[in-house]
Amino acid sequence: MPQTKDQDVVIGRRAVSEALEQAPARAAELLLAKGEKSPALGRILDLAKAGGVKVRRVDRAKLDALSGRANHQGVALRLAGYTYAPFAQIVMACRQAGSSALVVLADHIQDPHNLGAVIRSTAAAGAQGLVIPKDRACPLTPAAAKAAAGALLRLPVARVTNLSQALSELQEAGLWGLAAATRDAPPPWELDLKMPLALVIGGEHKGIGPGILKSCELKASLPLAQGSESLNASVAAGVLLFEIVRQRSV
């Protein structure tokens, strides 16, 4: 069975606009701050009315509380509910994608903005899904959904108990594990990345766990200027994902 949601609210003008455009059937209620007027909010209101979505004006304090003090820009959209995709669904999609299969595993990313940015890049790269662990990792919070800017409507996200086991199942399905290492590995453009891949991105503090790192057949690191320790997890994910896209398009 699908796992239950951790949040059912999208905040921010761009994310709300994309949600109303791409999946109006999932929209339950649009909340607008009282007294707020702008062309962007007017367009959002028009989209909601066209989709038959209930609209309600509320105090900014309610939006502040609903968004966890994240920057909601005067607008929030209640969804019928975001449901994590079954991991088996992502595995099946990878089998169907064959040589173009691509999945991202986020190893204990804890910052919601990082997670949202990784989701956005993963969707833009055409991946079959994203996998996150249940423990010691950021779930799909309103801030993560806002940073994803609507990508959650296109990308299945699975939440698993054991990320190492998930990687193993993807490898059994024919994918190769590619670890985003911080050092002691070649740059991605020196590797052949045209095979089916499970890209593992480490968390902000500890990086990829040693067990998962050891299980990956491939490792890549990005050359950094002297004195730089590492890149932000979402930046590293974006660079690696689009090197994969570049190689596959040649």
Image (spheres, rainbow, N blue to C red):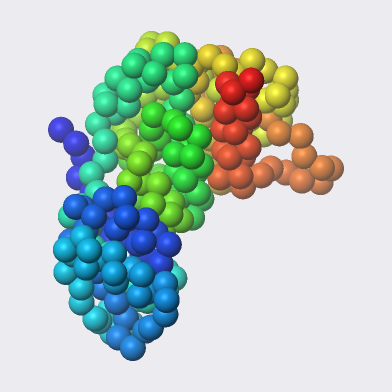
**Front-lying residue, 219 or 98:** 98
Name the residue located 47 percent from the left edge and 14 percent from the top edge: 99
Residue 73, image x, y percentages: 42, 73
Across and down, in percent, residue 100 comes to 47, 19
Q: Is residue 183 visible?
A: yes
Count every numbered label the image shows and give the total: 0
The part of the image, by quadrant, that contains residue 61 is bottom left
Across and down, in percent, residue 25 comes to 19, 52
Q: Residue furthest right?
A: 226
Which part of the image, by quadrant, shows the N terminus? top left
- Say above or below: 46 vs 143: below
Rendered position, 40 above or below 25: below
Say which residue appears at 51% left-offset and 27% top-offset.
199
Say left or right for 83 vs 168: left
Indicate whether 153 appears above or below 7: above
Outermost bottom residue: 35
Which part of the image, by quadrant, shows the C terminus?
A: top right
Residue 77 horizontal/vertical position (percent): 28, 64
Q: Quadrant of residue 20?
A: bottom left
Q: Is residue 144 left or right of residue 90?
A: right
Residue 5, relative to residue 100: is it above or below? below
**Quadrant of the image occupied by residue 17:** bottom left
Residue at left offset 67%, top offset 34%: 182
Q: Is residue 214 visible?
A: no
Q: Is residue 51 left or right of residue 95?
A: left
